[in-house]
Amino acid sequence: MAIDIANARSFLFVPATRPERFSKALESGADWVVIDLEDAVAAADKDRARENLADGFSGLSAVQRARVLVRINPTDSEFHDADLALLAVLVEEGLRAVMVPKAAVAAEIQRIADRLSEDIEVVALVESLAGVDALDYLAKLPSVVRFAFGHLDFQVDMGMNCDADEEALIPVRFAIAAASRRANMAPPIDGVTVDTKDLSLIQRHIDRALGFGFAGKLCIHPAQVGTVNRAFTPSRSDIEWAQRVVAADAHGGAVFSLDGKMVDMPVISKARHILAKAQSFEEA
């Protein structure tokens, strides 16, 4: 059983031009696999990428198809309409979700959902200042289940040149997390770490994402998946602590002491959230 997008931790990209990698990506441990028709595919290869996606998707099992998103080309791209025509077919074959890049105009995303299916789930990839400005409008769309942050394209859009710590992007990450919370959406997904070998770097990026309330990360290599999944999954010690807090809550949220520390309603709520999240992964 697939982990639903709202709870998914890891999203592994694979180019649509490499259909031999589709099954391998799905076996990597990633919660979801993003088959990419956009940035990973050169303009001259777009037609071949769509053909590969159509053939490769038909070769997947129903269970595998339920863990696939397709990142289409932007709505202002010459390739967009052909992408939608293919996805309309794939939806009939079990495709459940689409990633929309350069998300910025609510009406365009609504048009995509109307074309594909009323049940299609959209991950809106925020990659521009216009996207940040439109967050609250995008969040109102019933098809948009999560935001993802395309921090590299955002820097290009803004003419920024951030270092590895990306301190200049603090307001943007906060804005995306805040918009998600205002709309009662699932927490957002952070962008990629381009260094695929330095797992300490990806851990620092994950820690930063957790600090802003993000609950997942885009991955570009299978080696990153395990680190991402572990970091966004409650640890055994966290679960045991949460179980003790909930068990000790004998007065419906009244303040009490546990291990010499005050426990009040916010702490109890955090404990319940940890247990609910852990259970969602156990049931998947």
Image: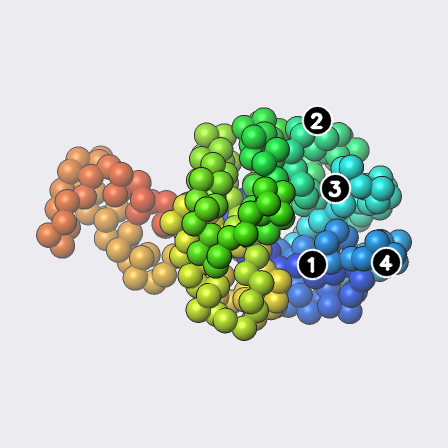
Q: Earlier in the sequence, mark 3 or mark 4?
A: 4
Contact? badges 1 and 2 (CB < 8 Å) = no
Residue at (48, 70) in percent of width and height: 199
Q: Nearer the viewer, mark 4 or mark 1?
A: 4
In the rendered image, the residue lying farthest to the left is 260
Residue 192 locus on image (x, y percent): 57, 57
Provide the secondary structure element on which disc 4 rests: helix
Q: CA distance from mark 2 to mark 4?
A: 29 Å
In the shown orientation, is residue 18 left or right of residue 281? right
Residue 132 locus on image (x, y percent): 56, 35
Q: CA distance from mark 3 to mark 4?
A: 16 Å
User: Where is mark 3, residue-wise?
Assistant: 74
Badge 3 local density, few (<14 within 10 Å), some, or many (20+)?
some
User: Where is mark 4, residue-wise?
Assistant: 45
User: Where is mark 1, residue-wise?
Assistant: 64
Contact? badges 2 and 4 (CB < 8 Å) = no
Residue 4 appears anywhere in the view: no
Quadrant position of residue 82: top right
- Amino acid type, residue under disc 2 in the picture: Ala
Q: Nearer the viewer, mark 3 or mark 1?
A: 3
Dot label at residue 107: 2
Badge 4 local density, few (<14 within 10 Å), some, or many (20+)?
few
Quadrant position of residue 11: bottom right
Quadrant position of residue 24: bottom right
Q: Earlier in the sequence, mark 3 or mark 1?
A: 1
